[in-house]
Image (cartoon, rainbow, N blue to C red):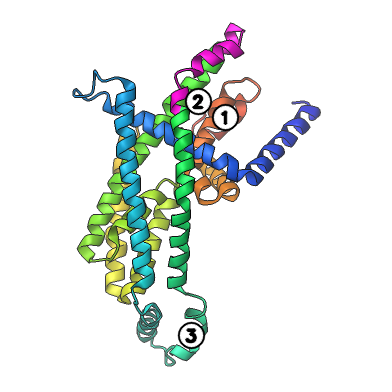
């Protein structure tokens, strides 16, 4: 690649990243709406395979999917608000539980000086205020209502435009070769991203149900909310499962101050994660994006630094879209090959 073209490419990438960071309030709802559209369209196509809905028009099945999804989202939002409020107002002696846990560790290690409230107050009481944190999260969830309405509006119009996109491509690209290339790119993106997001959502739902069952057996409070959080974190590749388990185990530690229950929670949630991650997911997701684990981790850091937690959740499909586009052109095809797991590109 000539030096001038390399300079232009670097400048273009820097400009795109700058726009994504500084324009996140405008761009991010659109990106979320696109990903959500993929999930809804995938669910609609799956439901139309059922014998009961096989002969129903697409728009009717899609409307049914939207109603189900909207009801589920509303229920999840209400559960999140209620649970965060309960955590903030529960009155549990979180600081005292931490001190008891640390005292038990000191006894096990044979330490003479046990931590006292006075020595731990600055570390625990002043630095860890779970009630205030929960109230802040509560405010965030409430303010997200308008954001959800905006994303939902985008989704409605995007799905309505889906059928006319092919005609627009024909009008924009007069050359037959360019038109065929564009169609191939869009078809591949649609197939791969719809399959990934829809299947991943089902897998995360299974993980959430299994995690809820484990927490229900252990009597952990607000189990529905924590199960939803575990399922949401599982969208994040590699580290998401660890984050979900760590949050719940940390909460249980603050709630009970009992090492036996904390270890039981860790073991049961880990079993659920291992079952889903090592057995269920490889069998259900027969087609993957064939991306190198190193590339996935690097892009995970990049997308997280650009768009935070949402960037981490959509890192895999966004990177897959980029690699599909790169693999379609001879000049950028080597980049896609290097980013793949085994050198083979998606068909």
Residue highlighted by disc 3: 121
Q: Residue at x 52, y 37 (%)?
A: 31
Closer to the chain start, of discs 1 and 3, is 3
- Image: 203 above or below 83: above
The segment highlighted magenta reads 159-179
Closer to the chain start, of discs 1 and 2, is 1
Question: x%, y% of residue 167?
Answer: 51, 13
Q: CA distance from mark 1 to mark 2?
A: 7 Å
Q: Mark 1 near mark 3, Cβ–Cβ under 8 Å?
A: no
Question: x%, y% of residue 188?
Answer: 47, 23
Closer to the chain start, of discs 2 and 3, is 3
Q: Residues within 10 Å of mark 1 (few under 14, many from 20)?
A: many
Q: CA distance from mark 2 to mark 3?
A: 57 Å
Residue highlighted by disc 2: 345
Q: Nearer the viewer, residue 170 or 112?
A: 170
**Quarter-wise, where is residue 45 in the image?**
top left
Front: mark 1 or 3: 3
- Residue 336: mark: 1
Q: Can residue 127 be seen at all in this image of the molecule?
A: yes
Relative placement, left or right, of 118 versus 273 is: right
Dominant secondary structure (helix, strand or loop) of the stretch shown in magenta: helix
């Amino acid at each position: 690649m000539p030096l001038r073209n390399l300079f232009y490419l670097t400048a273009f990438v820097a400009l795109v990243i700058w726009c994504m960071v500084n324009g996140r309030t405008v761009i991010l709802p659109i990106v979320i709406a696109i990903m959500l559209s993929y999930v809804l369209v995938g669910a609609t196509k799956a439901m139309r395979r059922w014998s009961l809905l096989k002969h129903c028009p697409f728009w009717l099945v899609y409307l049914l999917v939207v109603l189900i999804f909207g009801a589920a989202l509303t229920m999840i939002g209400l559960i999140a608000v209620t649970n965060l409020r309960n955590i903030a107002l529960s009155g549990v002696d979180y600081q005292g539980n931490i001190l008891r846990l640390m005292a038990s560790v000191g006894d096990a290690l044979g330490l003479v000086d046990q931590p006292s409230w006075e020595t731990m107050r600055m570390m625990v009481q002043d630095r860890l205020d779970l009630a205030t944190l929960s109230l802040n999260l509560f405010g965030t969830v409430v303010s997200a209502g308008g954001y959800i309405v905006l994303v939902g509006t985008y989704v409605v119009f995007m799905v309505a435009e889906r059928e006319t996109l092919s005609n627009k491509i024909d009008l924009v690209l007069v050359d037959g070769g360019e038109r065929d290339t564009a169609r191939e790119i869009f078809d591949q993106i649609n197939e791969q991203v719809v399959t990934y997001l829809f299947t991943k959502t089902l897998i995360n739902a299974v993980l959430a149900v299994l995690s809820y069952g484990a927490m229900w057996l252990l009597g952990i409070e607000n189990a529905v909310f924590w199960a939803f959080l575990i399922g949401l974190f599982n969208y994040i590749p590699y580290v998401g499962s660890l984050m979900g388990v760590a949050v719940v185990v940390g909460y249980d530690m603050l709630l009970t101050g009992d090492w036996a229950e904390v270890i039981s929670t860790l073991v049961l949630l880990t079993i659920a994660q291992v079952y889903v991650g090592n057995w269920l997911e490889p069998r259900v997701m027969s087609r993957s994006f064939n991306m190198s684990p190193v590339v996935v981790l690097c892009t995970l850091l990049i997308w997280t630094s650009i768009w935070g937690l949402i960037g981490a959740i959509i890192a895999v499909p966004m990177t897959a879209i980029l690699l599909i586009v790169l693999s379609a052109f001879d000049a950028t095809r080597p980049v896609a090959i290097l980013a793949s797991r085994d050198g083979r590109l998606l068909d």
